[in-house]
Image (cartoon, rainbow, N blue to C red):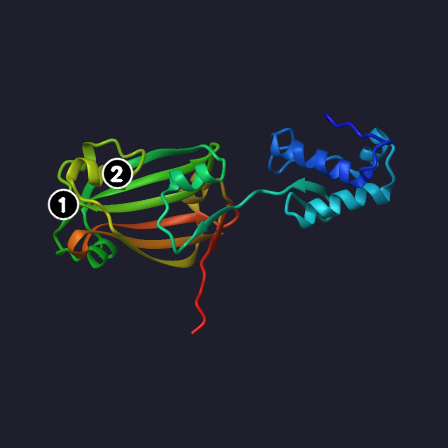
Amino acid sequence: MNMRIDYDSKVPLYYQLKEQIKQNILNGTYKEGDLIPSEREFNDLYELSSTTIRRALNDLVQENYLERKAGKGTFVRMRKVKRDLRKVLGFTKNMSEMGLTPSTQVLSKKVVRANAFARERLGLAEDARVVRLERLRLADEIPMMLETRYIRTDLCPGIVKQDLSSSLWKVFETKYGLKPNRHSQGISIDRVSGLSAQLLGLKEDTVVFLIKGVTYVQDNLPIECEESRYRSDKYELTFEAVVA
């Protein structure tokens, strides 16, 4: 551990220890999920009292840098990405604002017959065709969300041949002249299992956030709809309500 305690400083020892642990978390010396040294190990290394060490760790727990697990020790807390449901914010921008590196894996993209979900959300006939796009979105190479999108082929002919590994809305605008201007969405709870759980790096039957949404372009025309499953251990979904 690269820490230095100045015993002659006027800065309290607990605060010095706390700030150095925090810096080791922020600079990646301690990574998310890492077990940090025990109180005894800190004592052996820096000859600090249990009271001093405990106060530093308690403060970091309160500030959501650390978490304690009974019988296991103290760990670096897994940071959650905040997403404001009032705003339409693309995945790439959302991750970048959190200081994370976004990436996308296109799992599949093919023209299929629209299912009931797509027909209802997009106002399509029973025999309509759509592009079914499945993507895994990652941040710092950690799976964050698994999305399935249905895109109207009558509005976006040949889109299945486009590079769909980045902003889908940008493709709508630059390739088809259709600029999204509204997005409606609803949120519920779901459970993932099988391949979905495996792709997200989760255990069987894990609870996730399920967001269903529709994107509209000019003249209130729906162009695509989505079913996206967000890791509940990675996301904090927020909104602000107005008191009536």
Looking at the image, which residue is at 15% across and 55% down?
Answer: 219
Q: Position of residue 225 (x, y in %)?
A: 26, 51
Q: Can you say which quadrant of the picture contains the N terminus?
A: top right
Q: State which quadrant residue 20 falls in.
A: top right
- In what element is the residue under mark 1? loop
Q: Looking at the image, do the residues carrying marks 2 and 1 touch, with CB atoms under 8 Å apart?
A: no
| Mark toward the viewer: 2 or 1 | 2
Q: Position of residue 242 (x, y in %)?
A: 43, 67
Q: Position of residue 224 (x, y in %)?
A: 23, 49
Q: Which residue is mark 1?
A: 155
Relative to 118, is 31 on the left or the right? right
Q: Which mark is residue 76?
A: none
Within 10 Å of disc 2 (Cα), the crowding (few <14, some 14-19, many 20+) is some
Q: Which residue is mark 2?
A: 170
Q: CA distance from mark 2 to mark 1?
A: 14 Å
Dot placed on the residue nearer the N-terminal end, 2 or 1: 1
Q: Position of residue 188 (x, y in %)?
A: 41, 59
Looking at the image, which residue is at 15% across and 39% down?
Answer: 176
Relative to 218, residue 24 above or below: above
Residue 229 visible within the image: yes
Given the image, on which type of amino acid does mark 2 rest?
Lys
Given the image, on which type of amino acid does mark 1 rest?
Leu
Relative to 188, is 167 on the left or the right? left
- In what element is the residue under mark 2? helix
Relative to 68, is 112 on the left or the right? left
Looking at the image, which residue is at 69% across and 47% down?
Answer: 61
